[in-house]
Amino acid sequence: MSADVIDGKAFAANLREKVGGFAAEFEKAVGRKAGLAVVLVGEDPASQVYVRSKGKATIAAGMNSYEHRLDDTASEEELLNLVEKLNSDPNVDGILVQLPLPDHLDEQNVIATIDPDKDVDGFHIINAGRLAVGQDGFVPCTPLGCLMLLQDRLGEDLSGLNAVVIGRSNIVGKPMAQLLTAANATVTIAHSRTKDLPEVVRRADIVVAAVGRSEMVKGDWIKPGATVIDVGINRVPAAEEGKTRLVGDVDYTGASEVAGAITPVPGGVGPMTIAVLLRNTMVSAYRRENLTLDK
Ligand code: NDP
């Protein structure tokens, strides 16, 4: 048996196109484009790539992208002042501060300064709280993207399904578990202290792996027919000397012999993150202008 491949790239492209449609309607109704501000501190090469692709995708969707770059020696006061300026800028609907920040800056402090109603990354404690109690807010992009892929395959209501989320980070594992709970799945959160992880995973109809360890989840851990969402992005040496390739947290070859469906890496969860970021920005823009966003 070979698992169906969940094509996150195609799903994300479709979502981006939909956002583009809403962006055009928004501009017609309000007389300005929706806007996303991205703040990058320092020269981290991976962060530079992410910020560039977020900017490009924002413009491609018909929104304004405001990029702010600060030197890696920037003080916390300078960064907080910039965030406050963006909070009060009426043309900015979403604010994202690219993480990680240089060591001398306190990430929690910076995130806490972002207006929760412009926090399209969903990292502000107010948005974490809203998610926990089931109120409308912003949900972190990666887990929300995972939920969209799961519901596209399994339906909106996940009643009766056992889900195992491996990883309990604030940006992926925890919000993922809350989203699955809200969708009526029966959820187990596993982490580095979990005893007999393979046995825990074997009970799961839905597996979400967000660990950061290459190909850790093996094929014989997977229940036949399960849906497997691989969040991991790990760079490993490729067969050709000096080259690298990306792998997930799941042994794709082994797992696809057993699973019912699985996301590939790359091309699964990865493309969903930016698409959901654009979607969250659009939701923010509509809310801020008191417009209704028809799904
Ligand atoms: P973190 O490092 O913050 O969290 C990793 C989690 O995995 C922790 O909860 C940790 O447990 C758990 N863990 C570590 N080792 C084991 C183990 N041996 N067995 C069971 N659990 C273990 O990572 P993130 O949540 O930020 O990211 C996870 C992965 O997702 C990474 O590969 C990252 O690159 C990728 N990612 C991908 C995104 C995308 O756009 N596709 C976006 C964000 C992340 P404990 O809490 O006990 O330490």
Image (cartoon, grey):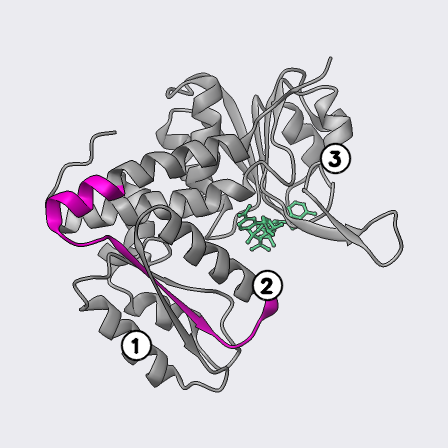
Mark 2–mark 1 distance (CA, rounded to whole Å): 22 Å
* Crowd band around label 1 with a 10 angstrom C-alpha radius: few (<14), some (14–19), many (20+): some
Which amino acid, by three-letter code, is at mark 3? Asp
> Within 10 Å of the Cα at label 3, are there few (<14), some (14-19), or many (20+) other Cα atoms?
some
Residues in magenta, as a range: 23-45
The quarter in which the N terminus is drawn is top right
Q: Is residue 204 magenta?
A: no
Q: Secondary structure at mark 2?
A: helix
Q: Residue at 51%, 52% (x, y): give it.
A: 169
What residue is shown at x 24% (from left), y 73% (from top)?
Answer: 84
For the image, the number of numbered tags is: 3
Sequence order check, earlier mark of 2 and 1: 2
Percent coordinates x, y for residue 76 in the rendering: 38, 82
Q: Which residue is mark 3?
A: 251
Left or right of 114: which side holds 179?
right
> Label 2 neighbourhood size at 10 Å, few (<14), some (14-19), many (20+)?
few
- Residue 117 shows in this picture: yes
Q: Is residue 91 above or below residue 254?
A: below
Residue drawn at the location 32% of the way across and 46% of the way down: 280
Q: Which residue is mark 1?
A: 82
Name above or below for residue 249 compared with residue 75.
above
